[in-house]
Amino acid sequence: MRYLDEYRDPALARRLLAELRATATAPWRIMEVCGGQTHTLVRQGMDELLPAGIRMIHGPGCPVCVTPLETLDRAMSIAGRPGVVFTSFGDMLRVPGSSTDLLALRARGADVRVVYTPMDAVRIARESPDREVVFLAVGFETTAPANAMAVLHAARLGLTNFSVLVSHVLVPPAMTALLDDPDCEVQAFLAAGHVCAVMGWEEYEPIAARHRVPIVVTGFEPLDLLEGILMAVRQLETGRHEVQNQYARAVRRSGNTEARRAVYEVFRIGDRPWRGIGSLPDSGLELTDAYARFDAARRFEVGALRPAEDPDCVAGAVLTGAKLPTDCTAYGTRCTPRHPLGAPMVSTEGTCAAFHAAGRTADLQETP
């Protein structure tokens, strides 16, 4: 990536931290929504360098982590069938379902393949007309355009052996659900820059106004995050509650209009369950009637599913920021990246994985 070093300049980081210390006169609690931002904060130790009283709350912005257990169990049922080629991004293979994961299923002989783009799955379907090819379409608004384009391309090719198992979720409804909780401690948000690169930030403006919370669209490098935190603190200190764009090099208010057009041609908004959180109204995407023939959930009857979370896993509380990973009794013992009880420990954007990779233990955490 060009121009990367300038967003990791230690001298600039020290200046931003000094300005934060000079600006903050009260304790503030800020949630970064994106799991990628969480990993930067924790890996660099930035959350521990912030002025006393400024606390980062790690949010539900890990798409792998919030994919509901029922969807994973459905994926296992479909992937294990003869004649099916089940395709997915690699970060989904080790996410535990109720009893197994896709990697273990592949080891037992299922045709489970890692792809790098949903178009790869379309290509496999075109080259293997005698096989049913299914793509696990998960993620926030960031991945929705590529998945929509795959469906559009399959439709143009007239493919009848390609389908998608959809589990897309949307950020604004999750933020609203958190703020509507009477126990919510979040006073400001860092919004995910890549989501806003697609969707823009217009959807965040009524949230900021209604709940009187600053929302700062922020990038993913250390200086992006420090500047985003500073912008949020400035608003909090002056009693403002606006949407600001720190990530101006990549995000416009209206987002990417072509990408949005493709998304809403293929998908419509509907209710969606979130793993560890529950069902949120109008918080996900589902295929429209015009493209329902590509819906793997309709194409494959799997019968009644009875998802069962491990009772020791507190992923839901971690995803909503109610608990830290180190609050979990299984963290680092029964639950590790090699043997995860829940998705936040195995995903590359999961908070538990971030804490574990950084060597965080309960005795190293400060009391909020």
Image (cartoon, rainbow, N blue to C red):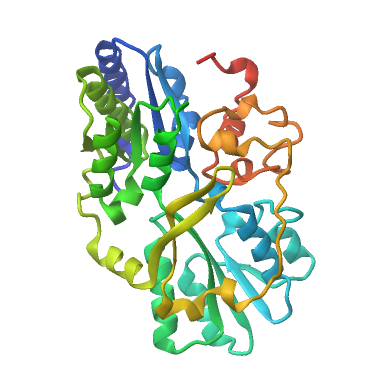
Write down the quadrant of residue 156 in the picture. Answer: bottom left
Q: How many marks?
A: 0
Q: Give x and y (percent) for residue 327.
A: 63, 25
Where does the image place residue 68, in percent across and percent down from the top left? 59, 53
Q: Position of residue 258 (x, y in %)?
A: 25, 67
Using the image as rendered, state which of residue 204 and residue 121 is in the foreground. 204
Q: Is residue 199 left or right of residue 116?
A: left
The answer to whether residue 158 of the structure is visible from this angle is: yes
Q: Is residue 11 above or below residue 257?
A: above
- From this view, report whether residue 366 is shown above or below residue 148: above
Up-down relation of residue 314 to residue 3 (above or below): above
Query: Can you see residue 250?
Result: no
Q: Nearer the viewer, residue 123 or 155?
A: 155
Q: In the current view of this chain or complex, which residue is farthest to the right? A: 108
The residue nearer to you, when weighing 190 against 210, is 210
**Left or right: 200, with 109 as reference point:** left
Residue plotted at (58% across, 46% down): 347
Q: Is residue 60 above or below residue 299?
A: above
Looking at the rendering, which quadrant does residue 366 occupy? top right
Residue appearing at x 30%, y 64% in the figure: 259
Q: Position of residue 145 (x, y in %)?
A: 37, 65
